C-alpha cells in the first residue's frame, strides 16, 4: 500500500530544496585514499567493468561542487567538494549512494529488484542530505519495498509529464549484472527505473544507456574508435516501437549539439542529451585517448545546472569504454562516499569489491 496524500507533483525536474534537508543529517566527509598503484592493476574486461562504476562515481563527485551553477569556459574544474550540501572533496552524492544500493542487491550476475527497493527505502529513511524531489515523493509514499512501483505509477498518474533524471543517474550498475545478455540488461534497467520513475521516457533512457554501457564493456575494441552514437542507436530495438522515432530524434539532437544547449537538465531527456553531447563533442586525444574520460566529464560539468548527475551519467558510459585506468590518479585517491547516512565510508577498494561481486568477478 502507499499513502496517496504524500505524493507531491513537482513537474519535470529533480529539484533539491534546502528546506527539505533534515537538520540532524550526517554526511560522511572523511576522504578514503586508495593506493594509487591499484589503478594500474586493472586491464581488459575487468578494467572496463570497474571503470563504469568508478567513472560514474568520479563524475558525481567532480560535479558535486558545481551543482546548480554554470562554470565558465575558463573556470578550473577539480574535486573541490562543497556545493549546496557541503560535500568533502571527492565525496559522491545521492546519485552514487543509490547506485551502490543497486550494487548491494546484485551478486554473481543476479539482481534482486525487491532488494533494490528495500535498499532504496533504507537509504531514504536514513535521512540523506540530498534527495531528488520525484524520488523523495515516491519513497516517502511507500510503506514497504513492494509499494515502490505502485507509488511511482501513482506519481505518474498525478503528473503525466513527470520524468526527472533520478533513475538515469543511478543506472550504471544495472548493465554489470547481465553482461552478454542484452535482453536481460534491458529488462532489469526498466524494472529498476520503474521503482521510482515510471514515465516511459525515464524507462527508455535507462534501457538505452544500460545497453550502451554493456556494449562498451563487452564488444568494444580498445584499439579501435568507439561509436558512442551507434551504441545508443543499437538499443532502440529494446524501446517500444511507437517511441523509437521519438528517441531517434533525441539522440540526433544530442549529436548535433552543442552541449551547452542541454540545460536545465533535471528532465531525463535533457540530462541524457547533455551527457551524450559532452561525450561526442569532446575530441579523443591522439596522444592519450583515455584522457577523453576526464575531458568529457569536465565538459559535462561546464554545461551547468545538475552537474553531478549529468557527469555521473556520462561517467558510467565513459568508464565502460576507457576503463578504471583512465580515471586520473588525483581523482582515484579521493573518491569516496557512503551507502547512506550514518554508515561507514566506502572507498575505491570496497567499491571494486561490490562491482566484482555483482558481476561474478569477470576477468579479461
Image (cartoon, rainbow, N blue to C red):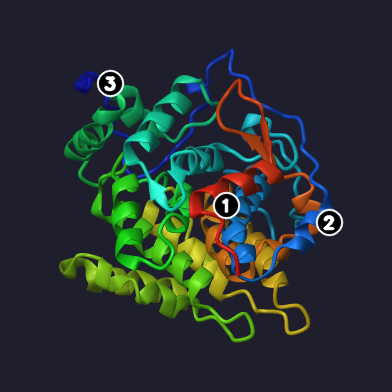
How far apart are labels 1 and 2 at the CA level? 18 Å
Quadrant of the image for the C terminus?
Answer: bottom right
The residue closer to the viewer here, 239 or 162, is 239
Closest to the camera, between mark 1 and mark 2, is: 1
Left or right of residue 184: residue 280: right
Query: Do the numbered discs 3 and 2 sit on residues whose CB atoms are within 8 Å?
Result: no
Q: How many marks?
A: 3
Which percent across, then down, holds residue 121?
Answer: 40, 27
Which percent across, then down, holds residue 221?
Answer: 57, 82
Closest to the camera, between mark 3 and mark 2, is: 2
Secondary element at tag 3:
helix
User: Nearer the N terminus, badge 1 or badge 3?
Assistant: 3
Quadrant of the image for the N terminus?
Answer: top left
- Numbered label attached to residue 6: 3
Residue at (46, 46) in percent of width and height: 107
Q: Is residue 223 above or below residue 8?
A: below
How far apart are labels 1 and 3 at the CA level? 38 Å
Secondary element at tag 2:
helix
Which percent across, then down, holds residue 149?
Answer: 24, 37
Q: Quadrant of residue 114?
A: top left
Q: Which residue is mark 1?
A: 356
Amino acid at each position: 500500500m502507499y499513502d496517496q496524500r504524500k505524493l507531491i507533483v513537482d513537474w519535470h525536474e529533480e529539484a533539491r530544496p534546502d528546506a527539505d534537508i533534515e537538520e540532524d543529517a550526517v554526511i560522511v566527509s572523511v576522504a578514503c585514499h586508495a593506493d594509487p598503484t591499484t589503478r594500474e592493476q586493472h586491464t581488459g574486461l575487468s578494467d572496463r567493468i570497474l571503470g563504469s562504476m568508478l567513472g560514474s562515481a568520479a563524475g558525481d563527485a567532480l560535479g558535486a561542487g558545481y551543482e546548480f551553477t554554470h562554470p565558465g569556459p575558463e573556470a578550473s574544474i577539480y574535486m573541490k567538494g562543497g556545493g549546496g550540501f557541503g560535500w568533502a572533496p571527492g565525496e559522491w552524492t545521492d546519485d552514487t549512494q543509490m547506485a551502490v544500493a543497486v550494487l548491494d542487491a546484485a551478486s554473481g550476475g543476479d539482481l534482486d529488484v525487491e532488494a533494490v527497493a528495500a535498499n532504496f527505502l533504507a537509504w531514504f529513511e536514513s535521512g540523506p542530505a540530498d534527495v531528488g524531489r520525484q524520488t523523495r515523493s515516491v519513497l516517502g509514499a511507500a510503506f514497504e519495498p513492494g509499494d515502490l512501483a505502485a507509488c511511482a505509477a501513482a506519481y505518474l498518474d498525478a503528473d503525466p509529464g513527470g520524468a526527472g533524471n533520478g533513475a538515469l543517474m543511478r543506472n550504471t550498475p544495472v548493465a554489470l549484472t547481465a553482461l552478454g545478455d542484452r535482453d536481460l540488461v534491458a529488462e532489469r534497467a526498466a524494472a529498476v527505473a520503474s521503482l521510482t520513475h515510471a514515465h516511459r521516457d525515464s524507462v527508455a533512457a535507462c534501457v538505452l544507456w544500460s545497453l550502451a554501457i554493456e556494449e562498451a564493456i563487452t564488444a568494444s575494441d580498445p584499439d579501435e574508435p568507439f561509436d558512442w552514437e551507434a551504441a545508443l542507436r543499437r538499443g532502440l530495438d529494446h524501446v517500444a516501437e511507437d517511441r523509437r522515432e521519438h528517441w531517434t530524434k533525441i539522440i540526433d539532437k544530442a549529436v548535433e549539439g552543442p552541449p551547452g544547449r542541454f540545460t536545465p537538465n533535471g528532465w531525463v531527456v535533457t540530462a541524457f542529451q547533455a551527457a551524450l553531447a559532452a561525450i561526442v563533442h569532446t575530441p579523443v586525444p591522439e596522444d592519450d585517448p583515455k584522457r577523453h574520460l576526464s575531458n568529457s566529464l569536465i565538459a559535462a560539468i561546464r554545461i551547468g545546472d545538475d552537474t553531478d548527475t549529468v557527469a555521473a551519467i556520462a561517467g558510467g558510459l565513459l568508464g565502460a569504454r576507457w576503463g578504471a585506468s583512465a580515471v586520473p590518479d588525483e581523482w582515484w585517491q579521493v573518491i569516496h562516499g557512503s551507502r547512506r547516512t550514518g554508515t561507514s565510508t566506502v572507498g575505491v577498494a570496497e567499491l571494486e569489491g561490490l562491482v566484482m561481486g555483482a558481476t561474478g568477478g569477470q576477468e579479461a
